[in-house]
Image (tube, rainbow, N blue to C red):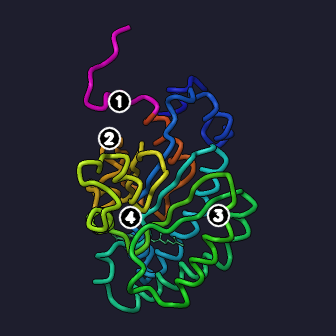
Amino acid sequence: MWKKILGFGASKEEQDLVSLYDKVPEDRRPRHVAIIMDGNGRWAEGQGLIRTAGHAQGVKTLERIMETCVDLHIEVLTVYAFSTENWKRPRPEVDFLMNLFSEYLDKKIQKMDDNHVRLRFLGREDGMSEALLQKMHAAVDRLAGNDGMVFNIAANYGGQDEILRAAQTLAARAKAGEIAPEDIDEDVFESVLDTAGDPPVDLVIRTSGDLRLSNFLLWQAAYAEFWFTQTNWPDFTPEEFVDALVDFAHRKRRFGGLDKKK
Ligand code: FPP
């Protein structure tokens, strides 16, 4: 589809994604892209493998998409790696995912640093092991001075939980006399969310066919555009990612207002 939109005749494979994306006007590009990386289990089942093999393959996809985002100068990439509801999964699968996060930090921190990426974790810390938390904090600290893309990993994250935590923080400040309840506006509320400082989510991508938000970035995605694909996350490619970005570039966003008359 993007070939047609961008007016190119050559095949996707022959095109350089970066030079293609350069054709998209800057004011039509998403600043903040959020991804629900779904379908790892279904991918593994389709290959006759155990579910966790799907998560391992999913990390490889994540690496490629993260690098694509860096190349395309996306400001913020947020991925849903583990929800507050995912604790209900069998313990071995939970442990496998926690190990994947840990390994990812060991193996990929240097590359993130080379790419000037700033890393942040969204979500609750309770339930994560002390060793993993230490590694997460060290990684965040090491990359904190970078000035490139913000990479948010939502791990032990739920949108409702995030909003409740923000409300508690503000209630405590009000109780301590630090803030008046009537001064709590959108900017103040946003400043105590896990994504404080990030632009709102422009585009939510969900792989694997389900059409729901699953408690992801409920506040931040208030005016986001949605893009869904049947592709399972391990099979998702940079080319399909650019399809989503180009499709986004053609959306009419009204933010509750009316189309501007020419
Ligand atoms: C959803 O697929 C995927 C997850 C719950 C985990 C996503 C995690 C990764 C891709 C690894 C991320 C790693 C790092 C380092 C951030 P599913 O298991 O629900 O698939 P299914 O719906 O087909 O069962």
Label 2 sits on what residue type? Tyr
Q: Kindly identify the residue that appears in the image at 55 percent across and 31 percent down.
A: 3
Q: Distance of mark 1 from mark 3, alpha carbons? A: 33 Å
Q: Position of residue 200 (x, y in %)?
A: 41, 45
Q: Position of residue 177 (x, y in %)?
A: 30, 63
Q: Nearer the viewer, mark 4 or mark 1?
A: 1
Which residue lies under the disc numbered 4? 38
Residue 81 included in the magenta stretch of the image: no
Q: Kindly identify the residue that appears in the image at 29 percent across and 48 percent down.
A: 183
Closer to the camera in the image, 77 or 178: 178
Rendered-image quarter of ligand 1: bottom left
Q: Which residues are magenta?
A: 249-262
Q: Are marks 4 and 2 in contact (CB under 8 Å)?
A: no
Q: Position of residue 219 (x, y in %)?
A: 31, 52
The CB of the residue at mark 1 lies under 8 Å from ligand 1:
no
Find residue 253 and name its label.
1
Q: Position of residue 223 (x, y in %)?
A: 32, 41
Label 1 sits on what residue type? Arg
Q: The residue tagged with tag 1: helix, strand or loop?
A: loop
Query: Is disc 2 surrounded by few (<14), some (14 to 19) or many (20+) residues within 10 Å?
Result: some
